[in-house]
Image (cartoon, coloured by chain):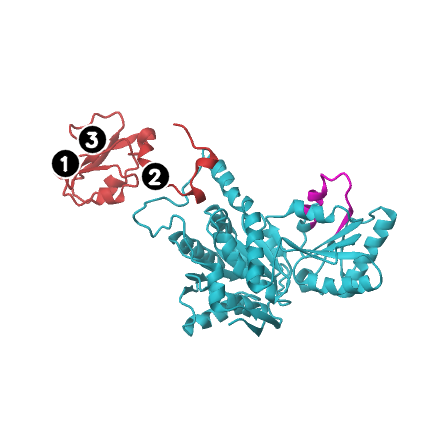
């Protein structure tokens, strides 16, 4: 990607391209573990969505549907915050096969 | 209506604040600038200003409030001194990096240790690389005039850089002087409406302010920042001229006093320049060709203009009201000496440090400096490039 020269930058470090951090795929260096979504345990409380520091929880039609691994760093916060007795998000080894329909 | 008023330096600044009535005033009191904050608080309590007056828990927070309010789109000011300016340190760089046209009145005071509340330039000289424009005032009138002009300079679209106005602690901040206070409406008209660039409160245009830059963009953003201060000289000049046309007191980068046929020159800023003028008058009546150059704008430093004014002198003494530990000389001296380097013919030049912690500098001291300059001019040699005035040795 071509980077701007100093003359092309907006005054005062301002970035007018709001939301451009979607271009940065933060999930390319995951910790070694990744979250796995178990839909039948999910009560749609949105705690995972609220706590995820990378906006990596997939939401469709107002419901949590899984994880967007392009942005997931494997920090595990979603799994810790998941309040259900049987967790709707569990951390698994990176190599582990994912259940069908649980994200990419 | 324009009127003569008897005010001290702090009241002169507060009077300008009342007339300009910025959107947000955030300040923490510290000697000798407390009376600025106190007077503004009184104006606010009496309903004489409409701006938000914020009393945060420290100077660091005061400058942080200024940065937030200026980013939101407000016209913003603060006032402080010495340790207070030091506590603002990291925020000064942020204000400049974000190109926010904040205006600060700095009542120049020494830096601890040892603790001292009196006037010298150690505080603002320490902040000279923070990216702020720096303007220094000789007396209450200049403090008032400079403070009004500071908004026009800071807010100019080519500049958009914070400006600090210095006035000497106690010598100016607490000394009464009769000054011309201009008409409220005329001052408001001169300063004009403030048009913020990219205000955060404009929610229809989403943006990020102060993002993280690593090795990929930081350098470009810092280079871009320099444009503001580098564009400022013609603006400073035009604003000083316009102020003169409107109010009768014109300002430039520096003042020359009896320099027309001068062969020797004393360079000194702020309140000491007033004393120096008396010394120059006495020296002139004794037939000595001595003049004064009083820098007003220290950042951006007008290297070329000052070098042009000094290049034909036989000898020059630069007087600094601060020291620069371990440096070749104090700040004003190194700037001026460096500016003269490219001239094949240039004057002999020496540096004196004076007045630290408010130590007096009197007419007799300037006359001693002049007699040393005479000797340097006669012999063509500088024995002591760096020395002190009125210090027990």
Earlier sequence position, callout 3 versus callout 1: 1
Residue appearing at x 12%, y 37% in the figure: A40
Q: Which chain is cyan?
A: B
Q: Which corner quadrant holds the N terminus of chain A?
A: top left
Earlier sequence position, callout 1 versus callout 2: 2
Image position of B188 with respect to B157: above or below: below
Q: Which residue lies under the disc numbered 1?
A: A39
- Disc 3 to disc 1, how far (Cα)? 11 Å
Splitting the image into 4 quarters, where does residue B169 fall? bottom right
Badge 1 crowding class, 10 Å Cα cut-off, few under 14, some 14 to 19, many 20 or more, is some
Q: Is residue B57 left or right of residue B270?
A: left
Q: Which residue lies under the disc numbered 2?
A: A17
Q: Nearer the viewer, residue A43 or B286?
A: B286
Q: Given this view, does label 3 or label 1 mark the residue nearer the observer?
A: 3
Name the colour assigned to chain A in the rendering.
red
Looking at the rendered structure, whether the residues under marks 3 and 1 are on a common chain is answered as yes
Q: Which residue lies under the disc numbered 3?
A: A103
Earlier sequence position, callout 2 versus callout 3: 2
Query: Is residue A63 in view?
Result: yes
- The boundaries of the magenta stretch are B333-351
Q: Farthest residue toward the left?
A: A40
> In which chain is the residue bearing label 2?
A
Q: Which corner quadrant holds the C terminus of chain A?
A: top left
Residue B337 highlighted magenta (yes or no): yes
Residue B138 highlighted magenta (yes or no): no
Q: Is residue A85 left or right of residue B246?
A: left
Determine whether the residue tagged by mark 3 lies in a helix, strand or loop: loop
Q: Nearer the viewer, residue B285 or A29?
A: B285
- Disc 2 to disc 3, how far (Cα)? 28 Å
């Amino acid at each position: 990607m071509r980077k701007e020269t100093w003359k092309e930058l907006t005054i005062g470090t301002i970035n007018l391209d709001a939301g451009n951090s979607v271009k940065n795929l933060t999930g390319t260096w995951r910790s070694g573990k990744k979250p796995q979504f178990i839909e039948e345990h999910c009560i749609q409380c949105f705690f995972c969505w609220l706590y995820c520091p990378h906006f990596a929880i997939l939401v469709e039609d107002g419901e949590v549907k899984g994880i967007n691994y392009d942005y997931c760093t494997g920090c595990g916060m979603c799994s810790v915050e998941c309040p259900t007795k049987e967790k709707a998000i569990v951390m698994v080894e990176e190599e582990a096969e994912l259940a069908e329909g649980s994200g990419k | 209506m324009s009127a003569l008023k008897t005010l001290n330096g702090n009241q002169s600044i507060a009077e300008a604040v009342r007339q300009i009535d910025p959107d947000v005033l955030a300040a923490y009191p510290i000697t000798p600038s407390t009376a600025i904050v106190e007077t503004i608080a009184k104006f606010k309590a009496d309903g004489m200003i409409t701006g938000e007056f914020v009393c945060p828990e420290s100077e660091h927070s005061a400058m942080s409030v200024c940065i937030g309010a200026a980013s939101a789109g407000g016209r913003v000011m603060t006032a402080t001194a010495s340790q207070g300016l030091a506590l603002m340190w990291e925020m000064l760089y942020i204000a400049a990096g974000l190109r926010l046209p904040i205006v600060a009145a700095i009542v120049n005071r020494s830096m601890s240790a040892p603790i001292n509340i009196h006037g010298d330039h150690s505080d603002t000289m320490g902040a000279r690389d923070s990216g702020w424009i720096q303007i220094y005032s000789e007396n209450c009138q200049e403090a008032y005039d400079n403070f009004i002009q500071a908004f026009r300079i800071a807010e100019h679209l080519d500049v958009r850089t914070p400006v600090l106005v210095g006035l000497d602690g106690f010598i100016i901040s607490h000394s009464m002087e009769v000054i011309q206070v201009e008409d409220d409406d005329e001052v408001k008209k001169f300063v004009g409406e403030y048009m913020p660039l990219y205000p955060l409160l404009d929610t229809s245009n989403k943006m990020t302010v102060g993002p993280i830059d690593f090795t990929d963009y930081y350098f470009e953003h810092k280079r871009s920042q320099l444009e503001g201060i580098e564009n400022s000289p013609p603006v400073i000049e035009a604003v000083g001229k316009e102020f003169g046309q409107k109010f009768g007191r014109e300002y430039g980068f520096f003042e020359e006093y009896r320099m027309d046929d001068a062969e020797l020159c004393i360079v000194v800023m702020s309140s000491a320049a007033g004393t120096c003028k008396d010394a120059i008058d006495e020296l002139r009546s004794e037939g000595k060709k001595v003049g004064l150059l009083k820098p007003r704008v220290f950042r951006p430093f007008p290297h070329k203009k000052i070098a042009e004014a000094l290049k034909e002198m036989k000898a020059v003494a630069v007087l600094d009201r601060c020291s620069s530990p371990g440096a070749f000389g104090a700040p004003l001296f190194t700037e001026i000496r460096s500016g003269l380097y490219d001239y094949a013919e240039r004057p002999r030049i020496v540096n004196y440090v004076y007045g630290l912690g408010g130590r007096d500098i009197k007419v007799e001291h300037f006359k001693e400096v002049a007699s040393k300059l005479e000797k340097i001019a006669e012999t063509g040699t500088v024995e002591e490039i760096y020395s002190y005035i009125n210090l027990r040795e």
